[in-house]
Image (cartoon, rainbow, N blue to C red):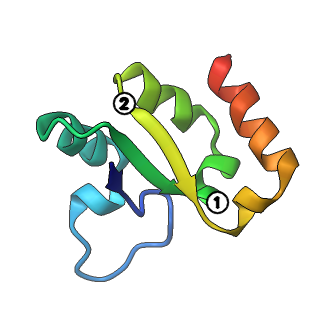
C-alpha cells in the first residue's frame, strides 16, 4: 500500500507521487503495490476518488479521525459502488 497526501494542503518540497492522485496511482501500479491509502478528509470531501482508484485495479483505504464516524464510512462505501 502507498500512503499519499493527495487532496491535502500542499507541503513545500513534497514529491508529486505523494501530492497527486494520478502520480500515486501510477507509482502504485508501477511497483505492483496493492493499493493507496488516503487521508479520510480527502475521501469524504470527494468520494468519487474511491471509484477512480478501484477502476485502476487498486485497493483504496483511508486513515484519520473522520474514519471514526459511521456516517462517513457509509457515505464512502455507498459512493464507491455507484
Q: Residue at x 63, y 44 (%)?
A: 46
Q: Nearer the viewer, residue 30 or 7?
A: 30
Q: Residue at x 22, y 80 (%)?
A: 13
Horizontal arrangement in the rendering, residue 7 relative to residue 20 (left or right): right
The percent position of residue 28, horizontal first and vertical second, equals: 23, 42
Number of dots carrying numbers = 2
The percent position of residue 14, horizontal first and vertical second, equals: 26, 74
Binning the other alpha carbons within 10 Å of mark 2 as few (below 14), some (14 to 19) or many (20 upward) gives many
Q: Nearer the viewer, residue 20 or 73?
A: 73
The percent position of residue 42, horizontal first and vertical second, equals: 58, 55
Q: CA distance from mark 2 to mark 1?
A: 19 Å
| Circles 2 and 1: CB atoms closer than 8 Å | no
Give the SS element for disc 1: helix
Q: What residue occupies the far left of the structure in this picture?
A: 30
Q: Residue at x 54, y 34 (%)?
A: 50
What residue sits right under mark 2 in the picture?
Answer: 58
Q: Residue at x 70, y 69 (%)?
A: 65
The percent position of residue 55, horizontal first and vertical second, equals: 42, 20
Residue 61, above or below 49? below
What residue sits right under mark 1 in the picture?
Answer: 41
Where on the picture, by quarter, is residue 27? top left
Amino acid at each position: 500500500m502507498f500512503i499519499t497526501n493527495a487532496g491535502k494542503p500542499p507541503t513545500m518540497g513534497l514529491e508529486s507521487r505523494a501530492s497527486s492522485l494520478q502520480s500515486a496511482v501510477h507509482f502504485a501500479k508501477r511497483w505492483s503495490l496493492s493499493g493507496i491509502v488516503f487521508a479520510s478528509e480527502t475521501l469524504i470531501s470527494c468520494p468519487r476518488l474511491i471509484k477512480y482508484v478501484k477502476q485502476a485495479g487498486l485497493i483504496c483505504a483511508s486513515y484519520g479521525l473522520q474514519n471514526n464516524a459511521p456516517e462517513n464510512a457509509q457515505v464512502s462505501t455507498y459512493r464507491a459502488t455507484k
